Image (cartoon, rainbow, N blue to C red):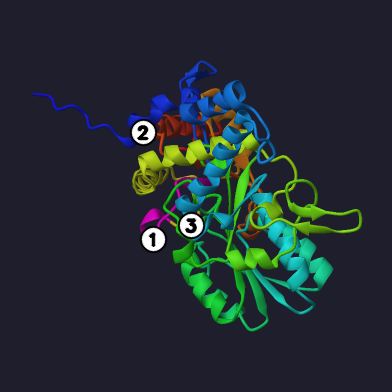
Amino acid sequence: MTLAKEKTLADQVRADFPILHQEVNGKPLVYFDNAATSQKPLLVINTIRDYYEQYNSNVHRGVHILSAKATDAYEATRDKLAAFIGAASRQEIVFTRNATEAINLVAYCWGMNNLKRGDEIILSVMEHHSNLVPWHFVASKTGAVLKFVDLAPEETFDLEQFKKLVSDKTKLVSIVHVSNTLGCINPVKEICEIAHKYGAKVLIDACQSVPHMPINVQQIDCDWLVASSHKMCGPTGIGFLYGKLELLRSMPPFLGGGEMIADVFLDRSTYADLPHKFEAGTPAICEAIALGAAVDYLNSIGMDKIYAYESELTGYLFEQLGQIPSIRIYGPLPKIAGLGRAALAAFTAGDIHASDLSTLLDQEGVAIRSGHHCTQPLHRHLMTSSTARASLSFYNTREEIDIFIKALKETLDFFGGLSS
């Protein structure tokens, strides 16, 4: 008797993602660019359509039924996000255009008002540009000093160096939770514990962690956390900022205009309570509602289950890549990653340019990313201008990894037999 093959998580969910069922250049699409943006399930796609077909209206301002329905759905997403990341209050969730805007909100509303000459901001060499450039602005305006945590020998966050860097001068630590290039999962809970002993605040860039693993901001004890919808099966154009309630209350507004006010006079204004103080103007209503649908979808699967399956996929991906001698993968191997490793591999293959690799792989229907992944300082640190990056999600399969590896070997052979 032949036993039926047990269905994997990907087998269970792939039908929910219509974009995956197509051919590219005559080959079945293998989408391995999830760290750049995730694909969207039918629940999210249909939620967008339902909004525009059934209750498109502005929120908070109208008493008619369409406005009430839109407002309820919009604000329901705030509740869903608060529960999803373990926030203590719905008022701690602020909608932004994306994680970049969320970091800038903290930089301008807290950084510009609380930092002075000689104060220190600790970042790391692996930060995304979105968690570097805003602090360049703040440092240039306030005189604050930027300090950087280097990489440990395993190409992970050097916690021992961080312990030496942090001091009474440290006022802010802003660190990525999961590197979009190295794939390492940084010890954010321990980072927060250490920083708080010196009275410093901590911001966590969770763009690459919120979609892939359970997150609880109260357990981490971060002061702020940011993430983007489009990386977590939701639409583009919206993200969110989590901040501790009293800290957000102490910060002035970022933008002025409608929605964020209590009263407006010709010569002065007073501001609304949280979170609306930071949400000026007509928001991305449909996008917020669809983000709520994405959270519902992820919850229906279970973040523990997603993390376990992606970890299994990651092990298989590294096992297969490890059999190609010319491949150099950046970041820790899954077996020595300590806290675990994200489901991505950034790599180089001898002198072949990453863009050449990705272009030829695209001809085989395989979509990967090439370039510096908005981490130019990290790539300089690694002494390479660019890497190719294959990044997975819970709807990817082992069979797709096999297709990718076969296409990669053929591509390397095209460049001179580097696959053996």
Q: Which residues are magenta?
A: 333-347
Outermost bottom residue? 168
In the image, which disc is placed on residue 336? 1
Residue at which label 2 appears? 10
Which three-letter amino acid code belongs to the residue tagged 3?
A: Cys
Q: Which mark is residue 184?
A: 3
Q: Nearer the viewer, mark 2 or mark 3?
A: 2
Asked which secondary structure carries label 1, the reply is helix
Q: Residue at x 61, y 75 (%)?
A: 200
Determine if the magenta segment contains residue 339: yes
First in sequence: mark 3 vs mark 1: 3
**How far is disc 2 from disc 3 in space, using C-alphas?**
23 Å
Q: Position of residue 170 (x, y in %)?
A: 65, 77
Front one among 42 and 262: 262
Categorize mark 1 by other alpha carbons within 10 Å: few (<14), some (14-19), many (20+): few
Task: Tell me the residue at 41%/61% (across/down).
Answer: 339
Q: Residues within 10 Å of mark 3 (few under 14, many from 20)?
A: many
Q: Alpha-carbon distance for marks 3 and 1? A: 10 Å
Q: Residues within 10 Å of mark 2 (few under 14, many from 20)?
A: some
Question: Of the residues shown, which amino acid type is indicated by label 1?
Answer: Ile
The quarter in which the N terminus is drawn is: top left
Q: Position of residue 272 (x, y in %)?
A: 71, 55
Q: Residue furthest top?
A: 26
Extreme residue in the left direction: 1
Asked if residue 376 is among those painted magenta in the image, a careful observer would answer no
